Image (tube, rainbow, N blue to C red):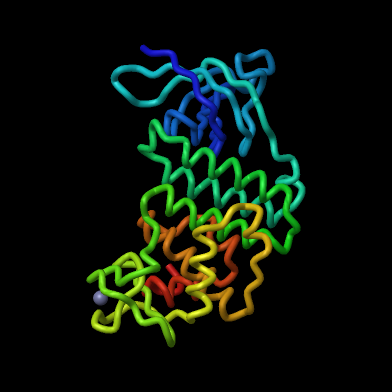
Amino acid sequence: MAIEKATGITVRLADYSETSQIATFVTDVAGRLSAIAKGARRTNSATGGPLDLLTVNEIVFSTSRSGGLATLREARTMEQFPALGRCVPRYYAALYCAEVSAFYSEGSEGSSGHFDLLRDSLRALSNVQEESLTNILFYFESHVLAVSGLSPNLATCARCGRGVPTRGPARISLEDGGLLCDACSGGVEIRRGSLAALRRIFESTPQNVQRLKLGRDLHRDVSGFLAAAVAHGAGRVPRLLRYVRPDAGNIRQRWMGAPVNR
Ligand SMILES: [Zn+2]
């Protein structure tokens, strides 16, 4: 049995018994971690009462050599985001980021990329004007792909490596992982302006992404592509997607070739 420390964001919580919880954290050093917090629902527990979702905590936990669920020994809340709970769109956006981060951070031990991204995104979702929430989701989605080594190739043909045309609509393919050249068939047409916006978003920060203003068509392209790329990389459509993208059905139809209802 080894005792370890980490900083972790609670991304999933389930009651386990009358007094215990099972918590899943996205951590800075231990990747995604699920731990049982015995007695956590008692106020005098080592976690100081029940754990809360979407909080940053310093945690001490033990793991057994046989693997499986870790045991949470101590937890101290370092940062909370009360603004998220006061506004439904903010809350759903945050839960979506948590769900996606929980998926992509599996096996990311030793790297704090997913932890940093989720914490920065929760901070931004707490603070920005409500009309900028979608831009923060664009930031999160592009960067969760980048942290996972799944950035689409937006420079050259993702299939053959040749140059891509610089005028007219571009074609982009989730299966190939980026743009396609004239010689390679397939993909989905995307406006030149949407491609420029995507390039900016992949280079953006939570601060400057807020200034991004897209017309309706470009917004639909960018929104659809990023949501579909995240679902494609995960191999499944996030449960919370339909709460943050009212047009989730269209996204799947256009970008993923999936039936609208499933
Ligand atoms: Zn090609």
Horizontal and vertical percent for residue 161?
25, 69
Left or right of 230? Residue 77 is right
**Quarter of image, res 43:** top right
Looking at the image, residue 63 lies above or below residue 167:
above
Viewer-proximal residue among 252 and 218? 218
Looking at the image, residue 145 lies above or below residue 182:
above
Horizontal and vertical percent for residue 182?
29, 84
Q: The C terminus is located in which quarter?
A: bottom left
Residue found 74% across the figure and 59% down from its top? 130
Residue found 36% across the figure and 82% down from its top? 165
Residue found 44% across the figure and 71% down from its top? 252
Residue found 62% across the figure and 59% down from its top? 209
Left or right of 96? Residue 169 is left
Looking at the image, residue 60 lies above or below residue 56:
above
Viewer-proximal residue among 257 and 155? 155
Q: The N terminus is located in which quarter?
A: top left
Horizontal and vertical percent for residue 148?
39, 48
Left or right of 78? Residue 182 is left
Looking at the image, residue 145 lies above or below residue 221:
above
Horizontal and vertical percent for residue 230?
44, 58
Ligand 1 shows up in the quarter that is bottom left
Number of numbered markers: 0
